């Protein structure tokens, strides 16, 4: 049977996978149980995005601010990440996934960096889903880092201030070939961005569900896509202009 939403799949989906801790605590389990279950959901959602033909999937996995959590939780998450990367590598190869990571990766434990490097190397020639994990990532830091790179070029005289525009700025972000997300999904119900992809989501469609990440299903992903397909993306224009253009094309 053909999926009801398959006709118009957003090219780039970005997800804040939130609610692991609350999911576990509501079952009288330690928060880490939620992270464990959450990792399984990540595998499932990656596979579904491959099946649907999504071009890019960016997953908020660990924020710059998450370093402020209790050291035991951070250690657990780093360990889980290391194991996840090692286990998932086979799927990257089998599913033609091109893997990458953005963020202040130098802050991650050496063992995690090594796993990241292996996954990036083994999958770099793949031309299917572009999977990017945001790790030790902060949107404001990404903007500040881009600004520094631009300022250095201006100081060296290799770039003129007049040349700086949106596209030059984008070229200095962590992953210049990443397109702006079309659909942003947040689980766990909080109505905020939490420092995720601040530059890139300026015109992204937001979809937030109360479901916690460990219980997020393929059907929820389909619901988000179906809802996305009902939206009219006007980018500042009027509805009438959009309707005329869609008739022409
Ligand atoms: C998201 O779930 C996972 C990470 C931030 C690493 P949380 O751990 O934030 O879960 P809640 O929001 O406390 O329920
Ligand atoms: C956002 O979730 C970060 C990730 C899901 C990795 P948080 O749980 O850290 O967000 P806040 O702090 O509640 O905004
Ligand atoms: Mg949270």
Image (spheres, rainbow, N blue to C red):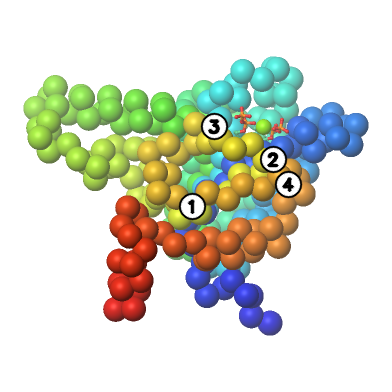
Q: Which numbered circle lies on residue 9?
A: none
Residue pictured at 56% horizontal, 40% vertical? 60
Image quadrant containing the N terminus? bottom right
Q: Are marks 4 and 2 in contact (CB under 8 Å)?
A: yes
- The residues tagged by marks 3 and 4 sit, at their Cα atoms, a distance apart of 17 Å
Q: Callout 1: helix, strand or loop?
A: strand
Q: In the rendered image, which residue does mark 3 sit on?
A: 194
Instruction: Determine the residue located farthest toward the bottom in the rendered image.
Output: 1
Q: Callout 3: helix, strand or loop?
A: loop
Q: In the rendered image, which residue does mark 1 sit on?
A: 205
Q: Earlier in the sequence, mark 2 or mark 1?
A: 2
- The residues tagged by marks 3 and 1 sit, at their Cα atoms, a distance apart of 16 Å
Q: Callout 4: helix, strand or loop?
A: loop
Q: Is mark 3 within 8 Å of ligand 2?
A: yes
Q: In the rendered image, which residue does mark 2 sit on?
A: 188
- The residues tagged by marks 2 and 3 sit, at their Cα atoms, a distance apart of 12 Å
Q: Are marks 3 and 4 in contact (CB under 8 Å)?
A: no
Q: Is mark 2 within 8 Å of ligand 1?
A: yes
Q: In the rendered image, which residue does mark 4 sit on?
A: 211
Residue pictured at 38% horizontal, 52% vertical? 179
Q: Is mark 4 within 8 Å of ligand 1?
A: no
Residue 63: x and y in percent read 56, 30
Q: Residues within 10 Å of mark 4 (few under 14, many from 20)?
A: some
- The residues tagged by marks 4 and 2 sit, at their Cα atoms, a distance apart of 5 Å
């Amino acid at each position: 049977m053909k999926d009801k939403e398959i006709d118009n799949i957003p090219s780039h989906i970005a997800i804040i996978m939130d609610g692991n801790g609350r999911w576990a605590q509501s079952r009288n389990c330690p928060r880490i149980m939620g992270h464990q279950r959450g990792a399984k959901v990540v595998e499932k959602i990656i596979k579904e995005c491959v099946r649907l033909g999504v071009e890019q999937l960016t997953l908020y996995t660990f924020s710059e601010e998450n370093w402020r959590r209790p050291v035991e939780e951070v250690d657990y998450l780093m360990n889980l990440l290391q194991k996840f990367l090692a286990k998932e590598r086979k799927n990257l190869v089998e599913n033609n996934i091109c893997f990458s990571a953005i963020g202040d990766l130098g802050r991650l434990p050496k063992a995690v960096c090594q796993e990241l490097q292996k996954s990036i190397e083994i999958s770099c020639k793949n031309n299917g889903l572009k999977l990017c994990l945001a790790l030790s990532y902060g949107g404001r830091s990404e903007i500040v880092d881009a600004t520094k790179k631009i300022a250095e070029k201006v100081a060296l005289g290799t770039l003129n201030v007049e040349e700086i525009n949106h596209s030059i700025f984008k070229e200095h972000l962590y992953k210049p070939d990443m397109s702006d997300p079309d659909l942003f999904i947040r689980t766990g119900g909080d109505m905020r961005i939490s420092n995720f992809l601040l530059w890139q989501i300026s015109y992204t469609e937001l979809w937030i569900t109360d479901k916690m990440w460990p219980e997020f299903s393929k059907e929820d992903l389909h619901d988000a896509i179906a809802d996305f397909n009902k939206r009219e993306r006007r980018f500042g224009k009027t509805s009438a202009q959009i309707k005329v253009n869609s008739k022409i094309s």
